Image (cartoon, rainbow, N blue to C red):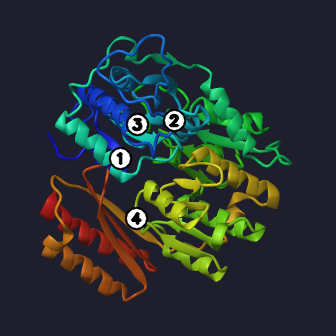
Amino acid sequence: MSERLFGTDGIRGMANQYPMTGEVSMAVGRAVAHVLRSHPITTQRSSLPIGLKPLESSKPIRRAKIVVGKDTRLSGYMIEQALASGICSMGADVILIGPLSTPGVAFVTQSMRADAGIMISASHNPYFDNGIKIFSADGYKLPDELEKEIERLVLTKEIDAMRPTGDLVGKAFRLDDIHNRYLVFLKALFAKDLDLMGLRIALDCANGAAYKVAPLVFEELGAEVIRSGVSPNGLNINDQCGALHPEGLAAQAIQYRADIGIALDGDGDRCILCDENGEIVDGDQIIGILALRMAEEGTLAHNAVVTTPMSNLGMELTLQEKGIAMVRAQVGDRYVVDTMRKNGFNLGGEQSGHIIFLDQSTTGDGIVAALKILEAMKRTGKKLSELKKAIRLFPQARDDVRIVRREKLENLPTVRASIEAGEKDLAGRGRVFVRFSGTEPLCRILVEGESEPQIKAIAASIAAEVRKQLG
């Protein structure tokens, strides 16, 4: 077995291949239920230890309860049932809520006073992958130390002998109305004195977890919604649609003369937009537009936003000119959230479209981000094409190189030499950033500068060397 299960965003891999098997999923469910009762700091409402003997039936039991949601992948059925079986086998109860976005699962975990939430999703990956993300009772992703403890328990099989019996065995419940609760929550985040009457929205839900809720949110606020990506069949999630493939949305926005296009990803925690002209508006531009609006309204905490090294240098300079600081956290939305919480910031996100508003949500939420942009459009009376002009971006060249092994960059002298040559060529007027993906076997290369031909050549040179060494 591999010594690592968790990456930067939970456990992820090809469904029905290690580690995304039914057996591992059941073991994860057991470990989560055990850790819940072993760490009072995370689960203050679950103090009863799991015993090996049944409690007397006359004694009241406060069972731990765990919410389990999923996206629309075919393999979600298999993993959902395995997780539920593992959780029940350790004496905790399971609330199965079916397809709902990752931020939706975090919301339900909080609102139902659950002890943890689990989202079954591989986010933007193709249908044949799947993953497991775990939230603590407060709706935030588990801290690294608890993930490591769950990982340890799964790999060592330490808790295999712990098997409650009798009335200590857990139960599973299925809730079918949970989408309406989340819908009400989302609508309440939109300014009470505004509506979306008169707006036409092209919406692409990536055939993913938000396919039910997202259209209703915008329609019930008054918009006309042109729907796409709302017919999941278990195999078409993220398939040439959604936030990773916004070109189809852009074409629809032009075809139907929409005021805005909104593309979500498979688990609904990120969004990419397009304006009325079909021009793409990425996560950096969304963050920049909202930072300027919030600063103007006096609601931007500490006049700062949190991004990652992938975010555009041009946006950073634009915000600095307006007195707004940009703090760069480690790549990964969980690290953006950690930085925000530690420093009291309320706006952050990633270029990929994870936008986090800690005043309203505990994780990135594509629907919330879109609502905030729509609110800005309504409040200012400006089109999205006008709002985005305020955010200056430098050209970026990106390349994702598929690799067969990982090696520290400092141990690859020819790759390091290629990176250093690119940095020298940019002469301080750009950036080179190379890292390994935390969720896929990829080396991600980003080069940023003022000349597009120059940065493309640098990125291609580095990518070629990476392929030679690791491909």
CA gap between label 2 and label 3 equals 10 Å
Classed neighbour count for the residue bearing mark 2: other residues with Cα under 10 Å, few (<14), some (14–19), many (≥20):
some
For the residues labelled 3 and 1, the Cα–Cα distance comes to: 10 Å
2 vs 4, front mark: 2
Which residue position is annotated with label 1?
Answer: 146
Q: Is residue 466 left or right of residue 186?
A: left
Does residue 88 sit above or below 271 in this rendering? above
The residue type indicated by label 1 comes to Leu
Q: Nearer the viewer, residue 94 or 14?
A: 94
Residue with the mark numbered 2 = 45
> Which residue lies at the image location 24% right of the left edge and 36% below the top edge?
154
Q: For residue 178, what is the image quadrant?
A: top right
In the rendering, at what x and y percent does residue 441 appear?
Answer: 24, 51
Q: Image point 37% across, 31% down: which residue?
A: 33
- Which residue: 35% across, 15% down? 54
| Residue 228 visible in the picture | yes
Q: SS at mark 4?
A: loop
Q: Is residue 64 left or right of residue 130?
A: right
Q: Quadrant of the N terminus?
A: top left
Residue 445, percent across and down?
32, 65
Contact between marks 4 and 1 (CB within 8 A): the answer is: no
Q: Residues within 10 Å of mark 1 (few under 14, many from 20)?
A: some
Q: Are marks 2 and 4 in contact (CB under 8 Å)?
A: no
- Residue 388 x %, y %: 65, 65
47 or 375, which lies in front?
A: 47
| Pointer 4 residue | 330
Closer to the chain start, of discs 2 and 3, is: 3
